[in-house]
Amino acid sequence: MKIAVVSDSHDHGDLLVRAIEIARDWGAQAVLHCGDVIGANTLRRAMGLGLPMHVIHGNNLGDIPMMSKLAFESGGALVYYGAEATLELGERRLFMIHYPHLARAMALTGDYDAVFCGHSHQAEIEKVAGIGGGHTWLVNPGTVAGFGEPRTLVLGDLAALSFSVRALQ
């Protein structure tokens, strides 16, 4: 299963749509958003692109009741988890949280195949050794919105457990 990982869209719906279009054209089947969506309306156009979206809120909470309502009314197009998410996609155990230091801690447990975060606005992909052996991918897609950093997303193949940073032009 191929996925797109985005974060820190900060109410830039047009840039989020562009990132998801790139992912859809690449063959992604789902989107993980690692937080700082801000307003739920930022997601409306993106939801129309046909890829299910798994979303957490980050430190810029926005309107949580509206996010919950939008998810409830989406018919499965949007799954909103709150501050963190444990999910299974493509037969992989995944964890998503906004903060990189907490994501690293979760990766160290070795309980997940991949852990995703945002917040720093800097894209980074790292293989982290777990405390009980094995490895977990720690993936930060950077920021869709830019804010002094390049606009980026991550494309991931869960079957191969491979991830790559893609610039958003």
Image: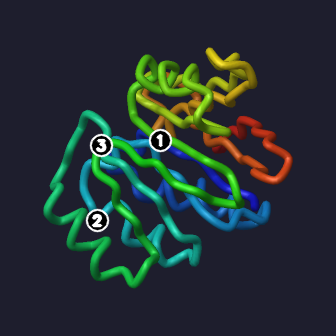
Based on the displayed image, in which of its 4 quarters is residue 127 positioned?
A: top right
For label 1, the crowd category at 10 Å Cα-Cα, with few meaning under 14, some 14 to 19 and many 20 or more, is many
Q: Mark 3 to mark 2: distance in Å?
A: 18 Å
Residue 162, position in %: x, y? 81, 40
Residue 21's quadrant in the figure?
A: bottom right
Quadrant of the rendered structure where residue 88 is?
A: bottom right
Identify the residue under disc 1: 96
- Marks 2 and 1, Cα distance to the nearest angstrom? 21 Å
The disc at residue 41 is 2
> Could you say where residue 20 lies in the image, as x and y percent from the top left?
60, 60
Q: Earlier in the sequence, mark 2 or mark 1?
A: 2
Please tell me which residue is depicted at 63% across the width and 59% down the height of the picture: 89
Say if mark 3 contacts mark 2, CB within 8 Å. no
Residue at 58 percent of width and 71 percent of height: 51
- In the rendering, at what x and y percent does residue 121 appear? 48, 26
Could you tell me which residue is drawn at 79 percent across and 61 percent down? 26
- Asked if 131 appears above or below 55 in the picture, the reply is above
The residue pinned by badge 3 equals 83
